[in-house]
Image (tube, coloured by chain):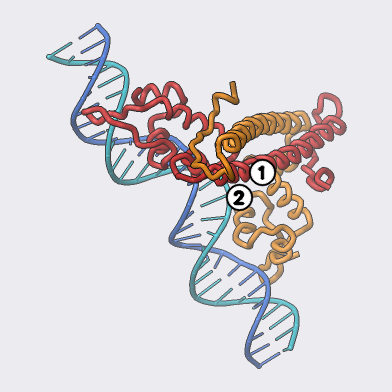
Chain colours: A orange, B red, C blue, D cyan
Amino acid sequence: MQTKDIIELTGLDRETLRFYEKKGIISTPKRTTAGYRKYSDEVIDRINFTLMAKEAGFTLSEIKELLNLKESGVNCKTGRDIALDKINEVDDRMKSLRNMKKVLKKFVSDCENTGGPGLKRKCHLSFDVKKVTK
Amino acid sequence: MQTKDIIELTGLDRETLRFYEKKGIISTPKRTTAGYRKYSDEVIDRINFTLMAKEAGFTLSEIKELLNLKESGVNCKTGRDIALDKINEVDDRMKSLRNMKKVLKKFVSDCENTGGPGLKRKCHLSFDVKKVTK
DNA sequence: CTTTACCTGGTACTATACTACCTGGTTTAT
DNA sequence: ATAAACCAGGTAGTATAGTACCAGGTAAAG
């Protein structure tokens, strides 16, 4: 596979793909005699993992650490503990999201209760973290 | 309240507080005759909301938009719809987090199943998005 | 055989969110 | 009265994650 195939399969653009190579997210691919990059299927998996982890709020360097556990020569215990740490981070972030959702929902219902006919009244509300997080 | 009180109550540092003022997250405070900033209680709420929304993955400019709904003169319907959009974003992000957690948990159990005694064996696993998201 | 599509490396630019440092003025406690 | 704590404005620097543009080489299709 060459650059355009990866682009097509992952939705990344050329510059971003190159950027991820530079950052060590994907390994430096083999080359044709003309210098064109030749990718293996494995990069697709790595990019998909990267995109998912990014959506989950992880940075590229965290993602790189996870992707390179195999190559880094650590043992299963270390690998597992690193993954468990990430699970805790995910849980924390889920908690923040649930909180944020509560605050937003409170705001929505306040809007609906005070907005008058057609909710045309001027919005005079603010987001109240206290009411919800307490 | 002056700068140091806000710092104490929010955990922000002076530079970040100034940065948030410049970005419009908090309104420009009144001043003493000597030019010192005098803050009202309201800024604490705004900063707390900001910190929560940041944890939930929102950018400062999104947060600013939410915080300034009241001042922006929009009506309740518009305000509510903006909040509803954010709720959808929160839900999407939660989905990503649940996915990420599944992948991490799969990795952890694979480690435990193949790690040998004391999980001392070399970690040869990679994260497999396919197995989980499919 | 030439046009189109694709590829190369390199440099520079953008936005977001801080963070650090400097010079100097003001308040407060001893 | 003087040292410590606090404040001001301003400039510059950092890290992250791209994005844009350039000059030119290669491959495939008509």
- Residue B10 drawn at (x, y percent): 46, 25
Kind of residue indicated by mark 2: Lys
* Residue at horizontal 74 percent and vertical 33 percent from the top: A79
Structural crowding at the residue carrying mark 1, measured as other residues with C-alpha within 10 Å and reported as few (<14), some (14–19) or many (≥20): few
- Residue B92 drawn at (x, y percent): 69, 43
* Badge 1 element: helix
* Residue at horizontal 42 percent and vertical 42 percent from the top: B23
Asked whether disc 2 touches disc 1, contact meaning CB atoms under 8 Å apart, the reply is: no
Dot 1 corresponds to which residue?
A: B88
Given residues B87 and D8, the one toward you in this image is B87
Dot 2 corresponds to which residue?
A: A23
Given residues A17 and B87, the one toward you in this image is B87
Q: Going by the image, does A60 lie left or right of D20?
A: right
- From the viewer's perspective, is residue B32 above or below residue C2? above
Structural crowding at the residue carrying mark 2, measured as other residues with C-alpha within 10 Å and reported as few (<14), some (14–19) or many (≥20): few
Residue projecting furthest to the front: A117
* Residue at horizontal 81 percent and vertical 48 percent from the top: B130
The answer to whether residue B60 of the structure is visible from this angle is no
For discs 2 and 1, the disc positioned in front in the rendered view? 1
* Badge 2 element: loop
* Residue at horizontal 77 percent and vertical 53 percent from the top: A42
- From the viewer's perspective, is residue B45 above or below residue B81? above
Chain containing mark 2: A
Chain containing mark 1: B
Q: Residue B44's image quarter? A: top left
Q: Which mark is residue B117?
A: none
- The N terminus of chain B lies in which quarter of the figure? top left
